[in-house]
Amino acid sequence: ISNFLYYQTNQSMADEQTPPAPPTAGEIVDNVAKRSGLSKEELALAKSLVEDGQDHLFAHWDAGESKKIKSQMKQLVALHKSYPLENGLLSYTANARKLLLASKEGKNPLEGWVPKVPKGEALELGTEKYDALEAKGLESIGKTGFVLVAGGLGERLGYNGIKVELPTETCTSMCYLEYYITTILSIQAKHAAPGTFLPLAIMVSDDTHDKTLALLKKNKYFGMRVNDVTLMKQEKVAAIMNNDGGIAQSESDPFSIESKPHGHGDVHSLMHSNGLPKKWLDMGLEYAVFFQDTNGLGFHTLAAFLGVSMELDLVMNSLAIPRKAKQAVGAVCDLTSSSGESMTINVEYNQLDPLLRATVSKAGDVNDKKTGWSPYPGNINQLLFRLAEYKVNLDKTSGVMGEFVNPKYADDAKTKFKKPTRLECMMQDYPQVLKGTEDSKKVGFTSVAAGLCFSPVKNATADGAKKQKEGTHPAVAFSGESDQYAAVAMCLRAAGCRVQKGQVKTFLGVSMESGPFLVVHPAVCCQPSHYKGVFVGGDKINILGGSTLIVKGKGKLVVESLKLDGALIVDTGDDPASTLTIKDVVVENEGWMEKPIEEGMPSAEWMKMRGYFMERKEACYITNLPKRGVGKFGVSGPGYRVDAGAGQTAKWMWVEEEPKEEKGVMGFGGGSKDEEGETVGCSPCNVM
């Protein structure tokens, strides 16, 4: 009996000590909601996420402070609302599970599709075909809206700021955003109907929004009207920690939700949510061009790009470059499915070769024997849309692009990730929303030499040097600047001018052509055909390889004959009614040149990432700014010679029939008499 009583007593004590079952995530949410003051919206989302299997997001709430709980729910609500599909986060996690399963099973998204060469045009500057299509495009270039995809910081490049404020080159230090806006304003002035103001939409992120706005305000929007600029802020998406679509939390703080960029495909949903396609159509615009943040060559071919769209009746046109077979550049392909559907779309280079081997030829991606290039042009993510069809398709889809996932697995079984992943989308995947429509047959490409249209600045200098050694373009600040000068040289040569090549120099392990340093402000020329109207002298204009030429101003400039061996700055002023003619002029001076930055030498970040600065020794400055009034001005006459003064400190000097020495300084400008008999001519040679 005593043993029985002992057992019963101990059993009762054991029963009393058995802990109750822990509360479920749903119970925790209900309990905490009361004391934390969650709104109905927040509580509903929390319960929906529990039902979605996201219990881990709330397991720590019992021990959490109300302030931290409210902060976590604020993050989740923001992620829920910013995702463009109807059910927000729940749609996002459902899509994540589907895509992650396909990734785990190794499914090929292109299975069943057969590639062929798409519809398009390959153009070469200086040919009749190029000139004709550019002339056609100029008819609509003044009816075009502009979309800048600029979500990034310059940290990867070694720059502590936004990429669009980086200088495009060191001669004038004009930043990318100023260069783009002044080009748009030039197109507006030269080709838009009176009273038409061309708009610019800029996609920014949390990291870049405030800095982009500050840059615009500081510089009075670089001359553009404030109402013509729209900043579209892209939100991030939740990071995913496993194949079950679990939303990731910060390792150091469970109340912080980890989020990542969703990709530049969001630009379409942002265009839709801001109502820009309709607004732009109502303004009388016909096209919208999408371009990248650090490609200073992107606008040279815009008119020809438009001309191809008009000629081929395209609703979407991809600017492309010739690519070598197997080159690490995505290719524009026309894909046809077994069901007969077709779409012209970008195919990543690592997918193209196996796809061709499996469907077209065992040889895969090979170069054409006649051209030496792959028949599939390289995509550079500069896109042109016809606004009427673009609006209709965005209204149907809310601008939501198809997503993909690219997890980095930690095991061969693909059950664990090395780090959280996220779903992504790309703006060039727009043709996916056209499948099954007549518009899907109206997608094509325009291919132009990379030297005229594509030189992005996207790599740190050390990484670019490695890529160049491997045979790839370095895509660094030095190469972007060098290619920008070279593109202007191409336009001048197409106008018949003689432009010699400079020497190859190496800075920080990157080797590029150094000189001539050619900067033609967009207000003067922004399309190749404009050069023919300014540099009319053809082969009577001779620019030596080590020279610097900077041309700016809104006045009319005509260059009939010029030999340049040194540095020359030409400024026609701000009055479009003024004129300046340069004829029979020889400029010889010590000029400007790139010099390496020595250790310990003070320099800005944007110079350090290049490895050099521009040493300005001597320069000639020719202008038509008279002492009074606006008179015609010409630098002309047999053998007129212009020699430089002493760099930045030169005084006002006038050229007569022979260079005249005054107070030890040689004359360096051009001079003539205006209508009132006053001598007009050169100002000090300071371009900055």
Image (cartoon, rainbow, N blue to C red):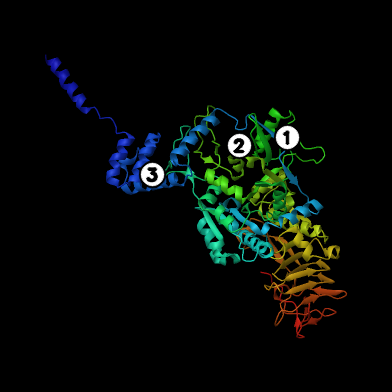
Q: Is residue 253 left or right of residue 235?
A: left
Q: Residue furthest left?
A: 1
Q: Amino acid at mark 1?
A: Asp
Mark 1 or mark 2, which has the lower sequence index?
1
Pinpoint residue 372: horizontal percent, then vertical percent: 80, 40
The residues bearing labels 2 and 3 have C-alpha atoms spaced at a distance of 45 Å
Residue beneath disc 1: 365
Between label 1 and label 3, give the one nearer the viewer.
1
Residue beneath disc 2: 436
- Along the line of sight, the residue nearer the viewer: 294 or 429: 429
Mark 1 or mark 3, which has the lower sequence index?
3
Residue beneath disc 3: 255
Q: Amino acid at mark 2?
A: Gly
Mark 2 closeness class: few <14, some 14–19, many ≥20 residues within 10 Å: few
Mark 1 closeness class: few <14, some 14–19, many ≥20 residues within 10 Å: many
The correct choice, above or below, for 679 with respect to 33 in the image is below
